[in-house]
Image (spheres, grey):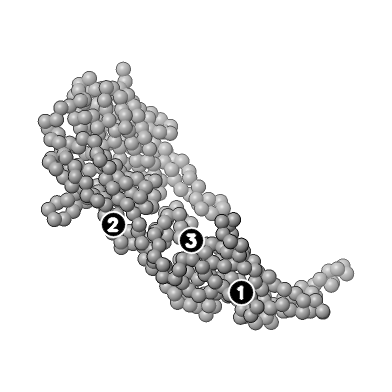
Amino acid sequence: MRLARRVLPLAASLAALALAAPAGAIPSDPPVAPLTPADGATLATDQAGITVTFACPAYNQDAPQTLGGITFTFLGSAADYFVDFATAARLGTDGRIGESARIDLATAQTSNELPVGTCRATMKSDQAVPGAEITPGGYHWQVVRTLSSCLGCPPRYEAGPVRSFTLRNDVTLTVARPSAVYSGYDHRFQLGAVGVPDGVDVVLERRRGRGWTAIGRGAARGERAAAIARLPRARQTVRVAFELGGQRSYGAPRAVVVRDGRTARRLTTRRDDGAWAGRADGAPEASSFRVVDGGREIRDLRLPVLLGCPNPGPTGGTILLRSPGVIRIGRIRVAPDGRFAKVQPDRAGVADVSGRLLRGRLSEGTVGLARGECTITGGWSGAKRR
């Protein structure tokens, strides 16, 4: 009990010291100093986040105080620094960027890759869908460190200067050289989408006169995308377009020769007619469909898949849950070389399938399904039932 009687008055005295301390910075402390990027820099959008660096040395959260001949210090460390990211530079009464303009608060991180006394922080959405880090525009950032405060008192901060940067899309968009393309049949075009965030659409466009018309779209995954579209016979020109945050980007045009689908030699025949079965990658059930009309059409496709659905994780971020889904498509036309492709929107989302029927086998199969935040992009294969 003697120990308790001595500690309580000391704790109360320290609290009183913190209450009486001035709100300004400690003169002997190093200033709050942002380092990179330079003020006004232009940076590329990045789904991994936008990183800034700053000095984060040890400092005094309050002026040293002497009580009973003992000097007490209130030390702060790198863990007490953070960065406010915002869309405007207006300051509040506490010296920080105004709360209404803030879009992210990122805590300081140290790394062996950084010099001692230097930290970094990253502007990145903690949601499943990327946010400001992939959106072009002007942004502001300010390094802040915490000052000590008494229990129940308003928090106090020491804030550094406000810096700005501009985000721009830095993308490379391409159309891969396609296999044979036939008039009257949908074709799956392979697209390059370097720098495009995962899950964001790119658009396939066709030149018409002096302008361009959208003919298909697809979501980027791993800097690639695919778009299913149909082109008229003769030589055509296509390109990829991408727009985000008011900034529009285009890829180089590619010429495509579209063959006459009515007269081309057909590789699928009546030998391909009948019942087929297959399976999508990782799917819990088999798929089924029929080929009819001398190998010209797929009917009654039922294709079970396993969707990936992001959900909030227990410690922040997201975790991926698996959910079954089924793609159902009534009719798909088969091109003369056995290739087929189809996009089918429905009330729940949009599905796309493609592949090639040849010698009783289904190869080059791809399948995509998006329902809300749940998606799948994968492969599938199959064969004719004997």
| Quadrant for the C terminus in the image | top left
Structural distance between the alpha carbons of marks 3 and 1: 22 Å
Q: Residue at x 19, y 49 (%)?
A: 206
| Residue 30: image tag | 1
User: Callout 3 environment at 10 Å: few (<14), some (14 to 19), or many (20+)?
Assistant: some
Name above or below for residue 19 compared with residue 304: below
Closer to the camera, 47 or 288?
47
Residue 100 seen in render: no
Structural distance between the alpha carbons of marks 2 and 3: 24 Å
Return the residue at label 2: 249
Q: Residue at x 44, y 45 (%)?
A: 309
**Helix, strand or loop status at disc 3:** strand
Name above or below for residue 189 compared with residue 161: above
The image position of residue 34, as x and y in percent, is 52, 69
The image position of residue 138, as x and y in percent, is 38, 68
Structural distance between the alpha carbons of marks 1 and 2: 44 Å
Q: Residue at x 19, y 45 (%)?
A: 255
Amino acid type at image mark 2: Ser
Closer to the camera, 360 or 24?
24
Q: Residue at x 34, y 54 (%)?
A: 171
Amino acid type at image mark 3: Thr
| Residue 51: image tag | 3
Q: Residue furthest front?
A: 115
Amino acid type at image mark 1: Pro
Contact (Cβ within 8 Å) of mark 1 with mark 2: no
**Helix, strand or loop status at disc 2:** strand
